[in-house]
């Protein structure tokens, strides 16, 4: 099974972001890193993969699914936005999980169990009953990732997941992402500037530039190699 | 899970979480109650219920005014909940997550409006109950009015929801709609038959106007006029469909050419 971008063009109004993107990503337990400077379209790519946005032209499809991609993605992908947005402020993490699992038609009990189980791995168990608004920036990020991961969709899309996390939380995040891949078999897309986190977890890099995929690296990279590659591409 | 079961599941979750939020935002809950009570007092004291009663040939002028007020209140709640709800969800980033639902967005807002309307009914019940001690109608008459307005609001709220969806489409397209929905809510109070009988056929395009008229006629012992019921249903179904079509179009266009996070 794979997600295919077929001549995908994406504009925001008249401003183009992607020109005729063509690529195929197999859905297997892997972590894919989207890399590039600010404004290159990393978050837009995640939103297209999530079906939150649709291509202005061209087609995104799952090669094994007959339904339109937007419909397929609503059940099989989860997008976790960057920043402190996306969850209800006066609800705690469990309640937010309850709300979003109901929207996806996923069993609430299963989501709650997942959140509790994953929270132990993510050092978040003590915060499960804290309102989202009362969490620190880093903990808000953890809560959003936890709710997204607990949906257990095949594809998890994380936008700048390590922003605002302290060093210990960054380590928790890296090991959590690897767990999701290894234990749950998720395909995880990450957009980030955090070279340390990327080099620790990513198996496959897509370097974005000028509305295209400039380079496709299908193997792990050490942090120094990643930085060198970055400077080489964006010099 | 079958689709209907999943929809019911969303409704119960909405109801449960709304209950929690009402308790947690107690300040907002009390202010809503005060707002509805204030609107009620304005309608009763700054209009002439006796004149309304005279127009219908009944001494129940106050009760007839309350019937108008109930249908207007629950109607503007439906309108406001979806127009303000979409704008707030867009600001807080919830809309992006909600677009990932397996159900269309309008379905989610419809369910949310139904759940929130139940709380508005509780406010109205409290206000009506208190008012019954200071007026000439009895608690039984009040309960009858509440029950009838509840039944007919199930129809009239379709149209009000549709109008709310049109405002929500404006929020999607222009990001901030300002106070236009609030202005419309106030205009509807003045232009409809809340404290006056219907005086112009054009008033019938307001979704709840037919509902008010039917409930008042039931109180007068005239039963339900089939033609009025058909007009009420047609007006509301048209507003509902128009609202959903415009909203769906705006969401589709925003998905293709716009962005939900640019606000």
Image: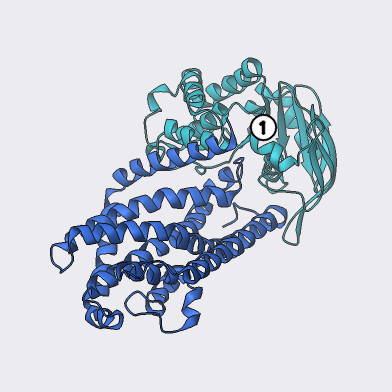
Chain colours: A cyan, B blue
Depth check: A215 or A45 in front? Answer: A45
Q: Residue furthest top?
A: A183
Residue B124 against residue A112 in the figure, above or below:
below
Residue B93 visible in the current orientation: no
Q: Which residue is mark 1?
A: A76
Depth check: A215 or A51 in front? Answer: A51
Depth check: B230 or A174 in front? Answer: B230
User: For numbered disc 1, what is the local secondary structure?
Assistant: helix
Q: Position of residue B170 (x, y in %)?
A: 57, 65
| Side of A157 relative to A203 (left or right) | left
In which quarter of the view is residue A89 placed?
A: top left
Q: Position of residue A164 (x, y in %)?
A: 51, 36
Residue B29 against residue B35 in the figure, above or below:
above
Q: On what subunit does the disc labeled 1 rest? A: A
In which quarter of the view is residue A77 placed?
A: top right
Quadrant containing the N terminus of chain A in the rendered view: top right
Residue B124 against residue A162 in the figure, above or below:
below
């Amino acid at each position: 099974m794979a997600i295919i971008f077929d001549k995908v063009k994406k504009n925001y109004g008249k401003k183009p972001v992607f020109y005729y993107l063509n690529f195929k990503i197999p859905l297997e337990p892997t972590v894919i890193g989207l890399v590039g400077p600010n404004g290159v379209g990393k978050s837009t790519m995640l939103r297209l993969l999530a079906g939150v946005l649709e291509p202005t032209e061209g087609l995104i499809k799952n090669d094994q699914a007959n339904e339109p991609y937007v419909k397929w993605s609503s059940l099989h992908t989860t997008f976790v936005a960057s920043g402190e947005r996306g969850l209800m402020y006066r609800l705690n993490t469990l309640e937010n999980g309850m709300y979003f699992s109901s929207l996806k038609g996923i069993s609430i009990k299963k989501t709650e169990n997942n959140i509790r189980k994953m929270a132990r791995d993510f050092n978040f168990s003590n915060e499960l009953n804290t309102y989202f608004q009362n969490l620190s920036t880093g903990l808000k990020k953890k809560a959003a990732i936890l709710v997204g991961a607990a949906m257990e969709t095949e594809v998890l899309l994380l936008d700048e997941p390590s922003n605002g996390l302290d060093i210990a939380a960054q380590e928790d995040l890296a090991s959590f992402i690897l767990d999701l891949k290894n234990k749950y078999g998720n395909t995880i897309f990450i957009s980030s500037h955090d070279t340390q986190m990327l080099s620790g977890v990513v198996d496959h890099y897509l370097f974005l530039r000028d509305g295209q995929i400039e380079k496709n690296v299908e193997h792990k990279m050490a942090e120094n190699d990643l930085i060198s590659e970055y400077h080489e591409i964006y010099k | 899970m079958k689709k209907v079961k999943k929809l019911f599941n969303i409704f119960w979750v909405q109801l449960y979480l709304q209950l929690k939020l009402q308790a947690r935002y107690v300040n907002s809950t009390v202010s809503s109650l005060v707002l509805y009570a204030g609107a009620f007092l304005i309608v009763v004291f700054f209009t002439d219920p006796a004149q309304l009663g005279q127009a219908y040939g009944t001494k129940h002028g106050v009760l007839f005014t309350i019937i108008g007020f109930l249908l207007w209140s629950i109607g503007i709640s439906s309108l406001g909940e979806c127009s303000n709800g979409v704008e707030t969800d867009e600001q807080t980033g919830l809309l992006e997550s909600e677009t990932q639902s397996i159900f269309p967005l309008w379905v989610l807002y419809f369910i949310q409006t139904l759940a929130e309307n139940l709380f508005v009914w509780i406010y109205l019940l409290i206000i009506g109950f208190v008012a019954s001690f200071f007026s000439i109608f009895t608690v039984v008459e009040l309960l009858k009015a509440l029950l009838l307005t509840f039944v007919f609001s199930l129809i009239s709220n379709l149209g009000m929801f549709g109008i709310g969806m049109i405002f929500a489409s404006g929020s999607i397209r222009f990001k901030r709609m300002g106070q236009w929905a609030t202005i419309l809510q106030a205009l509807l109070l003045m232009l409809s038959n809340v404290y006056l009988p219907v005086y112009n056929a054009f008033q019938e395009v307001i979704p709840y106007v037919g509902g008010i008229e039917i409930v008042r006629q039931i109180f007068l012992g005239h039963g339900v006029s089939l033609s009025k019921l058909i007009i009420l249903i047609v007006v509301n179904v048209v507003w509902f469909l128009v609202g959903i079509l415009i909203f769906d179009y705006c969401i589709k266009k925003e998905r293709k050419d716009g962005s939900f996070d640019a606000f």
